[in-house]
Amino acid sequence: MTNPPDFMKIMQDAAAAFQAGPAKMPDMLKANAEIAEKFAKVALGAAEKSAELSATYARETLSKLGEVSKVQAEPQGYGAAMQAFAKAQADLMQSQVAAFAEIAKEVQTDTVELMMSAAETAKAEAAAAMDKAAKPGKK
Protein backbone atom coordinates (compact mmCIF):
# COMPACT_ATOMS: atom_id res chain seq x y z
CA MET A 1 0.00 0.00 0.00
CA THR A 2 1.32 3.47 -0.85
CA ASN A 3 1.67 6.23 1.67
CA PRO A 4 -0.42 9.28 0.80
CA PRO A 5 1.28 12.67 1.11
CA ASP A 6 0.93 14.32 4.48
CA PHE A 7 -1.24 17.30 3.55
CA MET A 8 -1.21 18.55 7.13
CA LYS A 9 2.57 18.89 6.99
CA ILE A 10 2.37 20.66 3.62
CA MET A 11 -0.18 23.13 4.97
CA GLN A 12 1.85 23.70 8.14
CA ASP A 13 4.98 24.41 6.05
CA ALA A 14 3.03 26.83 3.84
CA ALA A 15 1.53 28.58 6.87
CA ALA A 16 4.98 28.83 8.47
CA ALA A 17 6.27 30.53 5.32
CA PHE A 18 3.52 33.15 5.63
CA GLN A 19 4.02 33.78 9.32
CA ALA A 20 3.64 37.38 10.30
CA GLY A 21 5.36 37.49 13.62
CA PRO A 22 6.21 40.60 15.60
CA ALA A 23 9.37 41.13 13.54
CA LYS A 24 7.33 41.46 10.35
CA MET A 25 4.68 43.79 11.79
CA PRO A 26 6.51 47.07 11.03
CA ASP A 27 6.94 46.04 7.39
CA MET A 28 3.31 44.96 7.10
CA LEU A 29 2.07 48.17 8.71
CA LYS A 30 4.29 50.27 6.46
CA ALA A 31 3.05 48.46 3.35
CA ASN A 32 -0.58 48.93 4.44
CA ALA A 33 0.02 52.60 5.21
CA GLU A 34 1.63 53.14 1.80
CA ILE A 35 -1.30 51.63 -0.11
CA ALA A 36 -3.78 53.52 2.09
CA GLU A 37 -1.91 56.74 1.31
CA LYS A 38 -2.17 56.05 -2.42
CA PHE A 39 -5.90 55.35 -2.19
CA ALA A 40 -6.43 58.45 -0.05
CA LYS A 41 -4.57 60.54 -2.62
CA VAL A 42 -6.92 59.30 -5.34
CA ALA A 43 -10.04 59.90 -3.23
CA LEU A 44 -8.96 63.35 -2.03
CA GLY A 45 -8.00 64.38 -5.55
CA ALA A 46 -11.44 63.38 -6.80
CA ALA A 47 -13.13 65.20 -3.92
CA GLU A 48 -11.14 68.35 -4.65
CA LYS A 49 -12.03 68.25 -8.35
CA SER A 50 -15.69 67.61 -7.51
CA ALA A 51 -15.75 70.53 -5.09
CA GLU A 52 -14.23 72.81 -7.73
CA LEU A 53 -16.84 71.69 -10.26
CA SER A 54 -19.65 72.28 -7.78
CA ALA A 55 -18.34 75.74 -6.94
CA THR A 56 -18.06 76.61 -10.63
CA TYR A 57 -21.62 75.39 -11.20
CA ALA A 58 -22.91 77.50 -8.31
CA ARG A 59 -21.08 80.62 -9.52
CA GLU A 60 -22.38 80.24 -13.05
CA THR A 61 -25.93 79.56 -11.88
CA LEU A 62 -25.90 82.64 -9.66
CA SER A 63 -24.57 84.81 -12.47
CA LYS A 64 -27.36 83.59 -14.76
CA LEU A 65 -29.95 84.28 -12.06
CA GLY A 66 -28.83 87.89 -12.11
CA GLU A 67 -30.15 88.15 -15.66
CA VAL A 68 -33.49 86.60 -14.68
CA SER A 69 -33.98 89.01 -11.81
CA LYS A 70 -33.56 92.16 -13.90
CA VAL A 71 -36.61 94.34 -14.50
CA GLN A 72 -38.02 93.83 -17.98
CA ALA A 73 -39.72 96.50 -20.09
CA GLU A 74 -42.33 94.08 -21.40
CA PRO A 75 -44.00 91.07 -19.69
CA GLN A 76 -42.69 88.81 -22.49
CA GLY A 77 -39.18 89.76 -21.37
CA TYR A 78 -39.63 87.74 -18.19
CA GLY A 79 -40.59 84.66 -20.16
CA ALA A 80 -37.66 85.13 -22.50
CA ALA A 81 -35.29 85.59 -19.56
CA MET A 82 -36.58 82.40 -17.92
CA GLN A 83 -36.29 80.53 -21.21
CA ALA A 84 -32.70 81.71 -21.66
CA PHE A 85 -31.93 80.74 -18.06
CA ALA A 86 -33.43 77.27 -18.50
CA LYS A 87 -31.43 76.69 -21.69
CA ALA A 88 -28.22 77.92 -20.06
CA GLN A 89 -28.86 75.63 -17.07
CA ALA A 90 -29.49 72.63 -19.31
CA ASP A 91 -26.23 73.27 -21.17
CA LEU A 92 -24.36 73.84 -17.92
CA MET A 93 -25.80 70.69 -16.37
CA GLN A 94 -24.79 68.65 -19.41
CA SER A 95 -21.19 69.85 -19.15
CA GLN A 96 -21.20 69.30 -15.38
CA VAL A 97 -22.38 65.70 -15.72
CA ALA A 98 -19.70 65.06 -18.35
CA ALA A 99 -17.04 66.57 -16.08
CA PHE A 100 -18.18 64.48 -13.10
CA ALA A 101 -18.16 61.38 -15.31
CA GLU A 102 -14.59 62.18 -16.34
CA ILE A 103 -13.56 62.44 -12.68
CA ALA A 104 -15.24 59.12 -11.93
CA LYS A 105 -13.52 57.49 -14.89
CA GLU A 106 -10.14 58.80 -13.71
CA VAL A 107 -10.75 57.53 -10.17
CA GLN A 108 -11.78 54.15 -11.50
CA THR A 109 -8.65 53.89 -13.65
CA ASP A 110 -6.37 54.96 -10.79
CA THR A 111 -8.05 52.53 -8.40
CA VAL A 112 -7.70 49.61 -10.80
CA GLU A 113 -4.02 50.45 -11.30
CA LEU A 114 -3.47 50.54 -7.53
CA MET A 115 -5.30 47.24 -7.07
CA MET A 116 -3.29 45.60 -9.84
CA SER A 117 -0.05 46.89 -8.33
CA ALA A 118 -1.02 45.59 -4.89
CA ALA A 119 -2.01 42.23 -6.37
CA GLU A 120 1.32 41.94 -8.21
CA THR A 121 3.19 42.70 -4.99
CA ALA A 122 1.15 40.15 -3.04
CA LYS A 123 1.65 37.60 -5.81
CA ALA A 124 5.42 38.09 -5.74
CA GLU A 125 5.51 37.81 -1.94
CA ALA A 126 3.35 34.67 -2.01
CA ALA A 127 5.53 33.09 -4.69
CA ALA A 128 8.66 33.83 -2.66
CA ALA A 129 7.05 32.35 0.46
CA MET A 130 5.93 29.24 -1.42
CA ASP A 131 9.41 28.80 -2.89
CA LYS A 132 10.85 29.09 0.60
CA ALA A 133 8.33 26.56 1.95
CA ALA A 134 8.94 24.14 -0.92
CA LYS A 135 12.74 23.94 -0.45
CA PRO A 136 13.85 20.50 0.72
CA GLY A 137 15.10 20.32 4.27
CA LYS A 138 12.91 23.21 5.38
CA LYS A 139 11.80 22.77 8.95
Image (cartoon, rainbow, N blue to C red):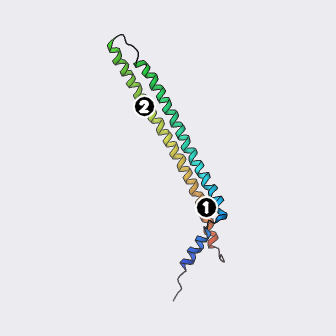
Which residue type does callout 2 highlight?
Answer: Met
Describe the element under mark 1 as helix, strand or loop.
helix
Which residue appears farthest toward the left when viewing the image? 75
Labels 1 and 2 touching (C-beta < 8 A): no
Q: Is residue 94 above or below residue 18?
A: above
Name the side, left or right, on which 99 lies relative to 128: left
Residue 87 image offset from top left, x and y in percent: 38, 25
Q: Residues within 10 Å of mark 1 (few under 14, many from 20)?
A: few
Name the side, left or right, on which 89 lies relative to 38: left
User: Residue drawn at (32%, 13%), measured in percent from left and top?
Assistant: 75
How far apart are the two marked residues, 1 and 2, measured between alpha carbons? 46 Å
For label 2, the residue is 93
User: Residue drawn at (62%, 59%), measured in percent from left and top?
Assistant: 28
Name the side, left or right, on which 45 lies relative to 57: right
Residue 24 image offset from top left, x and y in percent: 65, 63
For label 1, the residue is 124
Which residue appears farthest toward the front when viewing the image? 22
Q: Is residue 115 above or below residue 65?
A: below
User: Residue drawn at (56%, 44%), measured in percent from left and top?
Assistant: 42
